[in-house]
Structure formats: structure tokens, C-alpha cells
Amino acid sequence: MALMITDECINCDVCEPECPNGAISQGDETYVIDPALCTECVGHYETSQCVEVCPVDCIIKDPSHEESEDELRAKYERITGEG
């Protein structure tokens, strides 16, 4: 699954620089995650870095973008050109 940021986001700016795929950006009211770029850090790290640094735990799995680990790895390979 791709991740999403809930409306509990406090715009603290710590998640955006942690994303290795550039999937996080400032939205109208809170930060947002582009599901086309989010691999939950598969291919980069063992855990999702944005989730690790979020002080309010507002980053969750996006139920409208379910993906298996294999699908996330394939997306990582497409994005990075590796594989």
C-alpha cells in the first residue's frame, strides 16, 4: 500500500526530506503523499522513514492504494531505474 497523511498533520516539515522518492509535498492544508511515488521505502529502507519521524503518528496505510511488497518493489525499480 502507499501511505497517506491524515488531517492530524501539524505541518512540522520533518517527513518531506525523509522520503527517498520525493513522494511527499506540501498540500493545501497539510502535507500529502503521491501514491504513484510512494513505495513505503521498499528498496531503500527496512521501514517507512516518514512514519518513523512523524511526531503525531498521522501517516497511515492508504486503503485506496493497496499494493503488495512485490508491487512496491516493482514501483521502486520503475522509479529508480534499478532492478
Image (cartoon, helix red, strand yellow):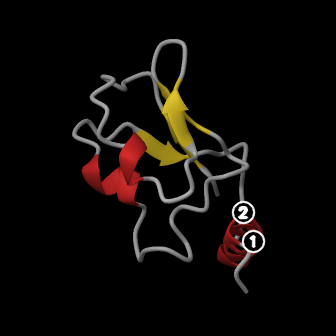
**Circle number at residue 71:** 1
| Element under disc 2 | loop
Q: Residue at x 65, y 41 (%)?
A: 34
- The residue depicted at 29 percent of the width and 43 percent of the height is 54
Q: Amino acid at mark 2?
A: Glu
Residue placed most toward the observer, 49 or 67: 49
x, y percent for residue 71: 75, 71
Query: Residue 11: x, y in percent?
Result: 33, 24
Farthest residue in the top direction?
28
- Whole-percent x and y of residue 8? 37, 24
Q: Residue furthest left?
A: 55
> From the viewer's perspective, is residue 13 above or below residue 64?
above
**Relative image position of residue 23 (x, y in whole percent):** 58, 46
Q: Are marks 2 and 1 in contact (CB under 8 Å)?
A: yes
Looking at the picture, does residue 36 appear above or below residue 27? Answer: below
Name the outermost residue toward the bottom.
83
Quadrant position of residue 49: bottom left
Image position of 54 (left or right of 18): left
* The label number, if any, that marks residue 67 in the structure image: 2
Q: Where is the C terminus found, in terms of image quarters?
A: bottom right
